[in-house]
């Protein structure tokens, strides 16, 4: 598990709309997103090892990055859901590290959305304050430039600091599909990562699957049982392709 010990960094996007281009251009749209670089010490404390690459374990995420992007490119896909059988497997840890690994490919732009609505954590992992809620954004109350922030020139996060118990209903609203389609059309990312709650807890993951291309499952060493993994694979593969099952060990190297 990632330890939730971070400092908040304030940021302001009140003038975001004034910076937008009159004619849509993905490059200019990306530049209009506020750029807030998380504190390196906070990232290190929360085990975002792909940011500084000082820990040898970052190589596992680089390999995962390359294999994942190759699989997506073959199919023309961009949207990946990241989930786990149960809590404690480290799916948010994998999401954050995978995102930072991909960000080292300068030509690849990525967007990460914290869709673990019941227990959002990516804002704490990055040490950033979520100014708006994910529910507000998915309900169409905010424009992308009001909601998203960049932590690197080619990496943007949609953070959430507000718990939402009706996540499954929100995901199944047609507005959510429209908002995600708009986001992809405006920013044209090569990769969209959706950090999701555990698949066996509620129906949130099943509810959001129509909006993704494939699923990456994170199993926790010493946490996930073979039965749990089998249940998740059977449940999700009936709806969307499984892109892989990654074993996130509690100790030692990350393997997949």
Image: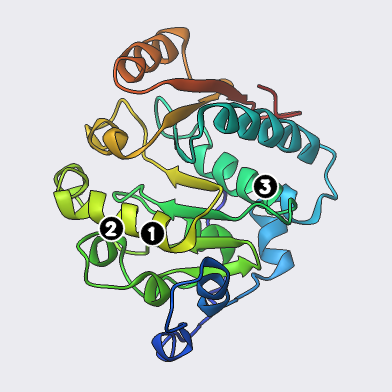
| Residue 140 at x, y percent in the picture | 22, 66
Residue drawn where x is 36% and y is 47% of the image: 116
| Spatial separation of the CA atoms under disc 2 and disc 3 | 24 Å
| Residue 39 point in image, percent of width and height | 68, 71
Marks 1 & 2, CB-CB < 8 Å contact: yes
Foreground residue among 241 and 126? 241
Q: Is residue 73 left or right of residue 235?
A: right
Return the mark for residue 183: 1
Q: Sequence order check: which comes first, mark 2 or mark 3?
A: 3
In the rendered image of this protein, does residue 129 appear above or below residue 115? below
The residue lying furthest to the front in this view is: 23
Who's the residue at 71% across and 37% down the image?
A: 61
- Chosen colour scheme: rainbow
Residue where numbered disc 2 is placed: 179
Check the picture and name the quadrant holding the N terminus. top right
Q: Distance between the residues labelled 1 and 2?
A: 6 Å
**Element under label 1?**
helix
Q: On screen, 61 above or below 170?
A: above
Relative to 124, is 44 on the left or the right?
Answer: right
| Residue 99 in view of the camera | yes
Residue 102: image tag = 3
Marks 3/1: CA–CA distance: 19 Å
Image coords of residue 10 (percent x, y) = 51, 82
């Amino acid at each position: 598990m990632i330890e939730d010990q971070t400092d908040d960094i304030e940021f302001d996007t009140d003038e975001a709309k004034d910076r937008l281009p009159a004619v849509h251009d993905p490059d200019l749209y990306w530049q209009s997103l506020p750029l807030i670089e998380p504190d390196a010490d906070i990232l290190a404390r929360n085990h975002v090892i792909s940011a500084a690459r000082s820990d040898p374990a970052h190589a596992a995420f680089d390999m995962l990055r390359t294999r994942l992007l190759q699989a997506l490119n073959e199919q023309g896909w961009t949207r990946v859901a990241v989930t786990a059988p149960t809590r404690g497997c480290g799916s948010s840890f994998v999401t954050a590290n995978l995102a930072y690994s991909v960000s080292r490919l300068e030509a690849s732009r990525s967007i990460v959305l914290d869709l673990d609505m019941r227990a959002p954590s990516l804002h704490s992992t990055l040490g950033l304050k979520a100014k708006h809620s994910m529910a507000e954004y998915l309900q169409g109350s905010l424009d992308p430039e009001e909601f998203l922030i960049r932590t690197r020139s080619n990496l943007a996060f949609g953070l959430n600091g507000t718990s939402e118990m009706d996540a499954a209903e929100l995901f199944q609203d047609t507005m959510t599909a429209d908002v995600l389609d708009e986001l992809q059309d405006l920013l044209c990312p090569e990769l969209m990562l959706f950090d999701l709650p555990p698949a066996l807890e509620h129906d949130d993951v099943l509810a959001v699957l129509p909006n993704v291309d494939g699923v990456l499952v994170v199993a926790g060493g010493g946490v996930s049982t073979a039965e749990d993994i089998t249940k998740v694979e059977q449940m999700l593969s009936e709806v969307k392709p499984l892109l892989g099952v990654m074993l996130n060990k509690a100790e030692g190297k990350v393997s997949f």
